[in-house]
Image: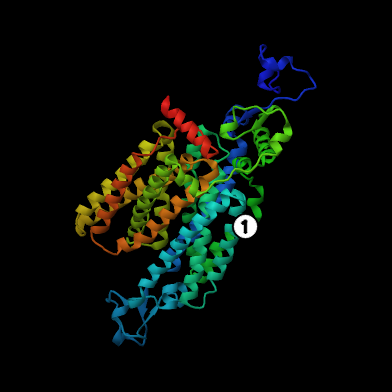
Amino acid sequence: MSENFPSEYSRPNDPNLHRPLLGPVAAERLCVDDVLQKYCGEFGRWQLRHFVLTSMAWALEAFHVMVVIFADREPAWRCTSGGTAGCSAAAKSVCELEAGSWEWIGGEESSTVAEFGLVCGQKYKVGLVQALFFGGCMIGAGVFGHLSDSKLGRKGSLLVVCILNAIFGCLTALSPDYYTYVLFRLLTGFSTGGVGLCAFVLATEPVGPSKRGIAGMSTFYFFSAGIAVLSGVAYVFRSWRALYVASSIPSILFLVTILPFVSESPRWCLIRGKTNRAMKIMHRIAKCNGNHIPDGVTLALDEEASETVQDKTELESKEAVTGSLVDVLRSPLTRIRLFLAVGINFLCSIVYYGLSLNAVNLGTNLYLNVLLNAVAEMPAYLLTALLLDKYGRKPLAIGTQWFSGAFCIVGALLKGYGVWKTLRMVCGVLGIFGMAGTYNLLFIYTVELFPTVVRNAALGCATQAAQMGAILAPFIVVLGDGIPFLVFGVSGVLGGFLAFYLPETLNRPLYDTMAGIEEGETGQAHV
């Protein structure tokens, strides 16, 4: 029997074989995961191309997040030829020197600290810029998380945030004073907050359930690669204004050369009632992968997958299914998941960004430090990706957080001088290694915990919590000595305990609607 025919024609006892030839054809209604597994292929050539193109947006996010490391750095200084009387090279800070007796190496244009005078009593303003940027990210994650679930869609939201990033990034380079600079960094944070979550969901939703974990965790390679590339870009463009322009141009290139070749998510099309458009995308996936979807197969939401439909017009008249965080909070099943996801993301962000800030204070070449930090995270991504489908999401979420937390607690007990200082640095590196794995895992875990209709809204809420942790991290770091390590250690251990209460999602379907997840998970609990 030719595989081009619907599966029901291969069953001799099927009553549909004896129906009148001119009658309506009953469609086989399957959810997206079933169509991917049975007909399209879970991760073929189409998904690979789509995944790589979409995940490049993570590099753009890395540019806009990490550019402050170079733009807001405090440059080296030297005594001027005429200021030897009031200047000493042995001074620990320019605050100890007389005005006019020293100068910045590279000039005032080398960083915002030099140009806007963010030293001595004004040094807190450097941290304020970073905090406000992450505050903008927190707001943007919620706004674009909702928009990508509603009318804009995943691709439409990614288009908007990339346009805004390019505009705000270039305008930042034109800032005439500190307060204008703060404003544009806040606006850049607002748009940057939607880049990662939109790109992640768009990249992973067309992937089959058995391949989704590894694919989802591979997105962070692009973020680390973006940081590594940024270190090279910053080495070339030593002026902070030129650096902001150089780090914003890639967003324009992404819009022009990559985004037109990215497809909208078939899951989003389905929940918005665009069934025909969703089916066209699924047919393209199958064709590119060398497979074929029979004519009698059509997409359906979770609770409709077992039903049949006799009239094609019924498919075209489906109404859009909508959802919001209110629906998540109304359901006891998703409410507890949201609270746990928010708590874990908040704690992990404190540890990850806090340890990252400590890592850059090694006193060596800044550009090399950033490059090595980016490369050091990649083994954690690889290890967790290899173990993800073997041990599941939950054990890894617990284990990586406890691994990080344990080394942070050990670091808090060590002294800050001599060989103990080196050992504390090693504990910090191992802590970053563990938390980088957790951070990578959390995105795919959060995606699988919620149905399509509210997935980006829930992910946006979790991302907002992570941004709150990022805002808090610099204030913990300034406490100094072993206190930051102690806070990071407790946060990691507590995050691991919270993960105990999350369900395992390994090989579980990606539900489309609130009704679908409640029916599916309740049924699974009774098995």
Left or right of 235, for residue 167: right
Q: Residue 9's x, y, as percent?
A: 69, 17
Callout 1, which amino acid? Leu
The quarter of the picture where residue 248 lies is: bottom right
Q: Answer whether residue 232 is visible to the viewer in this image.
A: no
Task: State whether residue 26 is above or below residue 82.
Answer: above
Task: State whether residue 263 is above or below residue 61.
Answer: above
Color style of the picture: rainbow
Q: Residue 309's x, y, as percent?
A: 68, 29
Q: What residue is shown at x 27% (from left), y 55% (from top)?
A: 487
Q: What residue is shown at x 35% (from left), y 60% (from top)?
A: 472
The quarter of the picture where residue 167 lies is: bottom right
Task: State whether residue 160 is above or below residue 396.
Answer: below
Image quadrant in which the C terminus is located:
top left
The quarter of the picture where residue 116 lies is: bottom left
Q: What residue is shown at x 40% (from left), y 36% (from top)?
A: 503
Q: Answer whether residue 10 is visible to the viewer in this image.
A: yes
Of 526 and 2, nearer the camera is 526
Q: What residue would you read off at disc 1?
A: 253
* Disc 1 secondary structure class: helix
